Every structure is written in structure tokens, then in C-alpha cells.
Image (tube, rainbow, N blue to C red):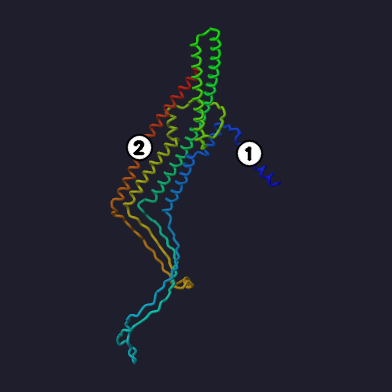
Amino acid sequence: MWRKLSVFAAVLTIIGAFYSQGNAQPQTLSIRDCIQIALKNNPDLKNAERQIRLSATNVTMARANILPSIRLNFSSSRTYQASQGPYLQDVPVLDPVTGRVTGFMQQTTFRDSYYRNFFNNGVSLDQNIYDGGRWWNQIKQSNAQYKSTESSYKESRQQTIAAVTQRYYNLLKGIKLQEVYEKAVESAREQLKKTESMYEVGVVAQADVFRAKVSLGDQQINLIKQRNSVEVNRTSLNLAMGWEPKHTIRIREENFEIGNIDESLDKMWQISEGKNSELRSLKENVKSDEYGIKVSKSSFLPRLSVSTSYSRGQTDFDLLYNPTDKNYSLRGSLNLSWNLFNGFSDHAQVERASINYYIDKEHYISRKLTIKSEIEQSYLNMKAYEEIEKIN
């Protein structure tokens, strides 16, 4: 009995859960809510943040080149030597009186198999002293790349906010237009009824009825198109927030206020040139390429480093450090190397770095002019809106 009641209660719980989900009211969001959701969920923004962490690891790796490399090693080996023989071996012949060697004779010899252990332990240190400026230019290059990535993240964040804001108000505008079309359909329907009544009493011609029907059809078509447009705008907003395209949402009616422009066009451009995240990112890319050229050219210069090592070896592990003043070796070296020729690979690296520099520099200059044009166009549009607002 209790088992049947438990199963029945579980079924009711599942049905209730499905019923509550099916009748759940869609969430009503403000523009601020949508922006916060997008900043949390937008995949492009997440990837931009991950790029910052990747750039930070590049900085750490570049700084590692100026630090010493310390390695600790330990090895243990066991060798088996199989039995040897028979083979002839020269054996000294001794004078029985004097004990001196009077000659040699060959004797058949055998050697038994044996095992031998060997233990080795040591520590070594390598320090780069000079590498043609490679390591400090790599540090500068990685720092420039990190700053570029930071600016790219800020640009992605600003683009996300702008996209959500634009799509939010596009959806709000679409909803308002849908309400207008719904009223237009209702008005056209009432006009058709009125025209049909007037036709029945002979006040208007049948052509007027046809025109009223056509007008109603046109308004209904406009309403259908606008409903589709609203759903498209809703899907677009969901995607900008990192949600499923068909996620059901409602938005609040919020007014969009346009402030007055107090700065001149030249002043606005100066502000943008110093604070625009995209321009700052591109500028840091150019700096990174400059350091990249210096890194490539360092291959033509000599390299100087020092290394030292301490090691101990013994066939008996207990005697490896006993006594400590024996059975060890110390080694120190000053290493100078100079790459004179490697098949023109270094020349190709310098050329690649130079080409990347000019590509990014041209991109920076081109984008700088484009943004300046966009600012000028936005400035003129804002001034036009101010004049239109005064007229209205």
C-alpha cells in the first residue's frame, strides 16, 4: 500500500514540475540586466579573458630566460656481464729466485659472470649572460602583447555592451511597432465592417468594399512581418547574452536618452585616440612587432653563458656520501657560441618579423583613419538629432 502511494506521489511531483515549467512566466529584464547577463555569458568575452591569461603566461616564460636553470638528477643502474672465455691471455713469468718478470706466456682464461651497481647524484646550474639582446627584447615584446590583449578584452567588452544595447532597443522598437500594426489591423477591420454596412444601404459602391478588404489584408501582412521581426530581434538579443536563441524573455520599456555634445570634433578625436581600446590594442601590436624584429636580429650576435655542476658516483649506495670529501666531481665552464651560418634561416626570420611589422602598422593607420571618420559621422548625426529635437 505504502509503495503504491510513494509511486503515485512521485508521478504527481513530476507532473507538477512539467506543469510549472510550462506555465512559468517569462523573465522580465531591464537593459542593465541584459548587459550584466551578457558580460557573464557571452562566449566571445570569455575567450577574450582567456587570451589575457595566455598573454600573462607568455610574460612569465619570457622572464624565465633571465633566471638560472637548476637541475637535480639521480640515476641508479645495474649491469650484468655474462661469463667470458675461453680466451688466451698473456700471463707474466716470474723468476723463482729474484721474483722479476722474465717473460710472458699465454694461458687459457675464463671469467665468471657478475653484476655491478652504480649510483650517481648531482646538481647543475646554467646561467645566460648575454644572448644578443634576445631575452630583454622578448620581455618587452611579451609585455606589449599583454597590453594589446588587455585592450582587446576591453574592446570586446565595449562591443558586447553596445550590441546588447542596440538589440535591446531594436526589440523594444519592434514590440512598439507591433502594437501599432495591431491597432492598424483592428482599425482596418472596423473600417471594413463600416464600409460593408454602408454598401448594404447603398451609400458606397462595391469597389469601396474591395478597397477596404485590400487595406485590411495589407495591414494583416504588415502585422505578420512585424511579429516575425520581433522574434528575430528577440533571438538576436538572446544570442548577444549567451542564451539559447528561443529563450523566452520580456523586456521593460525604457527610454533612450541622447545627451548633448559639449566637446568639439577635434577634442573628441583626441579623447578617442588616447582611450579607444581597439586603437590601443593595434598600437601595442606594432610595438610588439618592433621588439620581434630585434629578437630576430639577436641571432646574428654571439651568446655567452656559464654553467657549473656537482656530481657524485659510487658502486655502493651507502658509500655515495660516505665520506663526503671523496668520490665527487666539480665542473665549471664559460661558454661562448656564435652562429655563423644556418642556411639563411635567421635572415628569413628577420624578414618575417619585418613583414609582420609593416602589416600591423598599415592596419593600425587604416583603422585609425576609419575610426576618425566614424567619429566625425557620429558627431554630425548627434548634431542633427539636436537640431531635429529643437524643431519638434
Regarding mark 1 in the picture, which secondary structure is present there? helix
Count of marks overlaid on the render: 2
Name which of mark 2 and mark 1 comes first in the sequence.
Answer: 1
Give the residue drawn at x 53%, y 26%.
175
Secondary element type, mark 2: helix
Residue 97: x and y, percent? 34, 92
Figure check: 85 above or below 368: below
Q: Nearer the viewer, residue 358 or 128?
A: 358
Within 10 angstroms of label 2, few (less than 14), some, or many (20 or more) residues?
few
State which quadrant residue 70 falls in.
bottom left
Name the residue carrying label 2: 362
Nearer the observer, 238 or 367 = 238
- The quadrant holding residue 274 is top left
Q: Residue at x 63, y 39 (%)?
A: 15
Q: Which mark is residue 15?
A: 1
Category of crowding for the residue at label 1, using alpha-carbon neighbours closer than 10 angstroms: few (below 14), some (14–19), many (at least 20) = few
Residue type pointed to by label 1: Ile
| Distance from Cα at disc 2 to Cα at disc 1 | 63 Å
- As drawn, the residue found furthest toward the right would be 1
* Picture quadrant of residue 307: bottom left
Query: In the image shown, does 374 or 35 lie closer to the viewer?
Result: 35
Residue 111's spot in the image, x, y percent?
Answer: 38, 79
Q: Is residue 110 above or below residue 252?
A: below
Q: Position of residue 355 (x, y in %)?
A: 33, 42
Amino acid carrying label 2: it is Glu
